[in-house]
């Protein structure tokens, strides 16, 4: 199997790059993009970096379809049609105890972000449909994994994805991971031509962020370390 040695950090102009912690806190979900193409070289740079992610037995479980141009237009047209026809997306429901997180996020995105009044269900529905146009991004990614791998391998794909997003952040490119896209996986498979042996995990919108828009100024909080972590000692 062909392997390529990692690019030496010292060979790069460090001053043009973000520090790791800066990239981590700067990354956020972008939900409106400028109509500006992302050069293939930029995507390839981020993809190459992401390939250094750890994975179970180095299986490198990530398989990506990067959809742009007319292929993306065809995909978004079909997705929007399906979503607005009332066909419910096939997304596993959240358990009750986790639902408050989604409500908080919804309030921020639809309320502060889009300025939609709480009771305007039609405007909310319309905003939700923007998921299926990849929020106007010029690049739509479909993230897949072999159906033969165990569920735990999705962790490898997740690690890859975060590394990919951080690399994009460093390159000034915005992104949003979207489980909503996998809600219509059969349609996505057909339109993109994804082979049957791959599971479709999620989509990702990628492009340059429209920084003026309120929806992109939304920053959602996090639990404290104490809420999620137990230090076991003695
Ligand atoms: C697996 C996964 C699926 C997601 N699906 C969606 C989605 O369908 N639509 C959306 O707008 N955001 C989606 N998001 C983005 C999350 O809402 C977002 O990451 C979270 O609220 C934290 O906000 P931040 O990314 O701005 O830090 C998803 C994120 C992940 C990791």
Image (cartoon, rainbow, N blue to C red):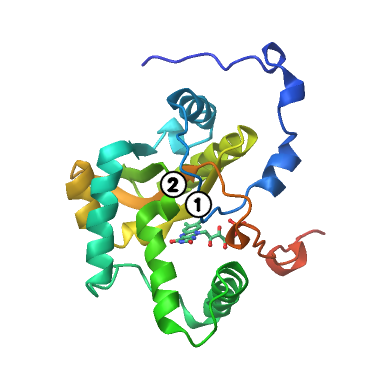
The x and y percentages for residue 152 are: 43, 51
Determine the image quadrant of residue 79.
Answer: bottom left
On residue 159, which mark appears? none
Q: Residue at x 50, y 45 (%)?
A: 34
**Location of residue 189 with respect to 221 vertically, above or below:** above
The total number of labels drawn is 2
Q: What's the distance in space between the residues labelled 2 and 1, CA to CA?
A: 10 Å
Q: Is residue 167 above or below residue 179?
A: above
Q: Position of residue 165 (x, y in %)?
A: 55, 41
Q: Is residue 79 left or right of residue 117?
A: left
Q: Is mark 1 within 8 Å of ligand 1?
A: yes
Residue assigned mark 2: 137
SS for dot 2: loop
Which residue is under mark 1? 176
Q: Are marks 2 and 1 in contact (CB under 8 Å)?
A: yes
In-front residue for pair 115/44: 115
**Is disc 1 placed on a helix, strand or loop?**
strand
Q: Is residue 7 above or below residue 184?
A: above
- Quadrant in which residue 92 is drawn: bottom left
Name the spot of residue 225 as percent of width and height, x first.
75, 62
Q: In front of the other: label 2 or label 1?
A: 2
- Report the residue that reaches farthest toward the right: 234
Residue drawn at (52%, 78%) of the image: 99
The percent coordinates of residue 227 (x first, y second) are 72, 69
Q: Is residue 194 visible?
A: no
Classify the position of the N terminus by image quarter.
top left
Q: Nearer the viewer, residue 164 or 117?
A: 117
Point 29% across, 67% down: residue: 90
Which label's residue is closer to the chain start, 2 or 1?
A: 2
Asked if the beta carbon under badge 2 is closer than 8 A to the nearest atom of ligand 1, the reply is: no
Tell me, yes or no, if residue 75 can be seen here. Answer: yes
């Amino acid at each position: 199997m062909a392997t390529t040695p990692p690019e030496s950090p010292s060979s790069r102009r460090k001053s043009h790059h973000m520090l790791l912690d800066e990239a981590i806190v700067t990354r956020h979900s972008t939900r409106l993009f400028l109509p500006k193409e992302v050069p293939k070289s930029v995507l390839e740079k981020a993809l190459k970096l992401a390939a250094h992610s750890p994975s179970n037995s180095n299986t490198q479980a990530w398989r990506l379809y990067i959809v742009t141009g007319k292929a993306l237009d065809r995909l978004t047209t079909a997705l929007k049609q399906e979503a607005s026809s009332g066909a419910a997306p096939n997304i596993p429901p959240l358990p009750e105890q986790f639902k408050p997180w989604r409500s908080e996020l919804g309030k921020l995105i639809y309320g502060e972000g889009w300025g939609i009044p709480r009771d305007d269900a039609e405007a909310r529905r319309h905003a939700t449909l923007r998921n299926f146009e990849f929020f106007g991004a010029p690049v739509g990614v479909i993230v897949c994994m072999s159906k033969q791998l165990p569920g735990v391998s999705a962790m490898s794909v997740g690690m890859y994805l975060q590394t990919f997003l951080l690399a994009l952040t460093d390159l000034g490119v915005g992104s949003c991971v979207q489980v909503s896209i996998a809600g219509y996986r059969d349609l996505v498979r057909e339109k993109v031509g994804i082979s049957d042996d791959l599971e479709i995990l999620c989509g990702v919108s990628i492009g340059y962020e429209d920084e003026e828009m309120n929806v992109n100024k939304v920053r959602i909080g996090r639990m404290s370390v104490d809420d999620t972590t137990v230090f076991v000692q003695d």
